[in-house]
Amino acid sequence: QDGKHRAPMHKWGGDTDAAYKSFMAFRCDWPQATTHQPCHSIVVQEGETHADRGIVQACQETGILRESYNLVACVQPVYEKVDHLEHSGILKLPQWIEYNAMHGVEQFLVYTMPGSDPRIFEIIDPYVKSGLVAQVHVEPAADLRPDDSSAQQLTANDCLYRMKHRALWLMPFIDADEYLSFSPGGVRETSFLEGISQLLSMQRHKVSLTEQ
């Protein structure tokens, strides 16, 4: 009533001491009519008394609200070490996005967090404006850096949850120096989906993951 909706909240996670599993996600059903609103004000209440316990602002990237995708890639937090520029994820990110888009990836989720290099935002800006990339910014309670393995596990778990039932195929844990290729008879496919289809049809097929 009056634009308000009440639903029970379900807690997921928080059941281990692992850094990437110590976070909790709260899930509740929401009216479909409000799907395209970018933000919602959620009042957390006690289950029996309905006493208010706080207000949470929950926002979403409305650019990824398509019902389904054939292929989605989630980009782990990229970083750069000045003593190893040849492995810079920041420098490799543009060509990596272009390569994967050319081979059939329909949507990219690029994860950022406190400590992310500000150049990343400039790199992904034209892709965000075109709708090809959606930025997902996470602020973990733990003191995690973009190059921490726990941060990568955290964002991979978020990717799996965020794209659940919405992507036919998903690459949840891939870095900007890793390239997927299908090579039947030494000829690379122009589409990952075509390569996957041939692989599943049990034809002779070679699959490789190459680091650049």
Image (cartoon, helix red, strand yellow):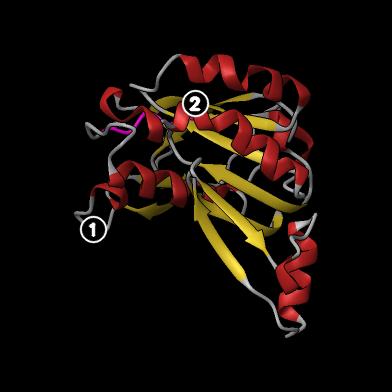
Residue depicted at 46% across the width and 40% down the height: 76
Q: Would you say 154 lies left or right of 34 here?
A: left
| Kind of residue at badge 1 | Thr
Question: Does label 1 or label 2 sit earlier along the sequence?
Answer: 1
Query: Foreground: 91 or 167?
Result: 91
Q: Which residue sits at x=61%, y=23%?
A: 39
Question: Dot 2, how many residues are within 10 Å of its Cα: few (below 14), some (14-19), or many (20+)?
Answer: some
Q: Which residue is mark 1?
A: 16
Residue 110: horizontal and vertical position, in percent?
55, 34
Residue 154, placed above or below residue 170? above
Residue 9 visible somewhere in the drawing? no
Q: Main secondary structure of the magenta part?
A: loop
Queried whether the magenta region covers residue 138, the answer comes back as: yes
**Quarter of the image where one finds residue 23:** top left
How far across and down, in percent of the image, does residue 116 sit? 39, 23
Horizontal side of 199 relative to 53 (left or right) equals right
The amino acid beneath tag 2 is Leu
Residue placed at 70% from the left, 30% from the top? 62
Label 1: element kind = loop
Compared across the picture, whether 15 is left or right of 114 comes to left
- Residue beneath the point at 79% across and 48% down: 67
Q: Quadrant of residue 4?
A: top right
Q: Secondary structure at mark 2?
A: helix
| Front label number (1 vs 2) | 2
Q: Is residue 10 magenta?
A: no
Which x, y percent locates residue 163? 62, 51
Where does label 2 land, which residue?
91
The residues colored magenta run: 137-141
> If the image is split into quadrants, where does the N terminus sit?
top right
**Distance Cα–Cα, label 1 vs label 2:** 36 Å
Residue extending farthest front: 186
